[in-house]
Image (cartoon, rainbow, N blue to C red):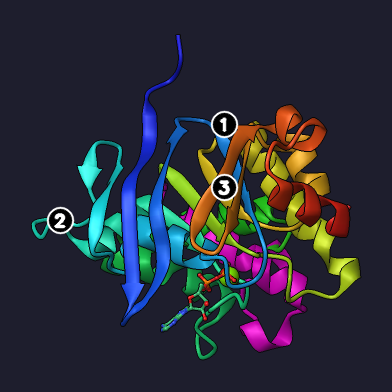
Amino acid sequence: MKAPEMIEITHVDKWYGTFQVLKDCTTQVAKGEVVVVCGPSGSGKSTLIKCVNALEPFQKGDITVDGVRVTDPKISLPKLRARVGMVFQHFELFPHLSVLDNLCLAQQKVLGRGRDEAMAKGEALLKRVDLAAHARKFPGQLSGGQQQRVAIARALAMDPIAMLFDEPTSALDPEMINEVLDVMVELAREGMTMMVVTHEMGFARKVAHRVIFMDRGEIVEDSAKDAFFNTPHSDRAQQFLSKIL
Ligand code: ADP
Ligand code: MG
């Protein structure tokens, strides 16, 4: 039996002024499923995943996470964003806080955890991303790859039920890409529900269950991984793949 859907995106339309950035987007991500989102720059990938944790509003359609509508005015946005962790291209760590405090802040403020509990959780997660020795440093003292691993650990500290990644390795020097992808591969293999905007097709081949291809605000292709790579049915996806593979 198929796992229940964790994220459901149904007929979503979004405009920035008169420019329609998302056009009738519909897809689902089941519990434990890893979905890679790719497509040309400007096709709406970031906008789509930001709608999932209500970082962007949308005018039409529906998005639910674990059965809860993200546009429901009664839900708490900080709690939604704790449940659906997000990792950005440019890390977005708090520069004035130590690495460990970056991991503790929202645990204490949003989840109401005590300082000791938050620190213990933070330290365990830093160990997991191989950064235990850097807990007292500031983000600016770390490499890009290390900062991105801190950002992933910070999201995981909230015990999310799903994770969104927006081009997490595209701002990194090439030699740091794998240390971040390795953490994401491990997370995927542990069964985390993930939507990952990336052009790292090696990652997609390794752990994605499905690949979504977007172009000009539309989901042009939404296929099982092997079908996407072996027999993309749209010309646009074929062209895109021929350029990046
Ligand atoms: P992608 O992540 O696929 O590169 P985005 O979702 O960032 O695409 O952007 C999709 C389109 O929406 C682009 O044409 C971009 O210029 C436009 N856009 C993004 N953010 C805004 C904004 N805040 N206001 C107006 N247009 C925007
Ligand atoms: Mg983007």
Report the span colored magenta: 132-160
> Looking at the rendering, which quadrant does residue 99 occupy?
bottom right
Which residue is disc 1 drawn over?
191
Mark before the other along the chain sequence, 3 or 1 = 1
> Looking at the rendering, which quadrant does residue 185 occupy?
top right
Viewer-proximal residue, 133 or 21? Answer: 21
> Looking at the rendering, which quadrant does residue 165 occupy?
bottom right
Quarter of the figure that contains the N terminus: top left
Residue 179 x/y as whole percent: 80, 58
Residue 158 falls left or right of residue 213: left
Residue 219 x/y as whole percent: 52, 49
Is the residue marked 2 within 8 Å of ligand 1, measured from its CB? no
Give the structural element (helix, strand or loop) at label 2.
loop
Q: Amino acid at mark 2?
A: Ile
Nearer the viewer's eye, disc 3 or disc 1? 3
Q: Amino acid at mark 1?
A: Gly
Mark before the other along the chain sequence, 2 or 3 = 2
Q: Is residue 138 above or below residue 89?
A: below
Distance (Cα) linking label 1 and label 2: 26 Å
Q: Are marks 2 and 3 in contact (CB under 8 Å)?
A: no
Q: Is residue 149 above or below residue 147?
A: above
Which residue is disc 2 drawn over?
75
Q: Are marks 3 and 1 in contact (CB under 8 Å)?
A: no
Mark before the other along the chain sequence, 1 or 2 = 2
Residue 74 falls left or right of residue 215: left
Which residue is disc 3 drawn over?
220
Q: Is residue 53 visible?
A: no
Residue 202 x/y as whole percent: 83, 46
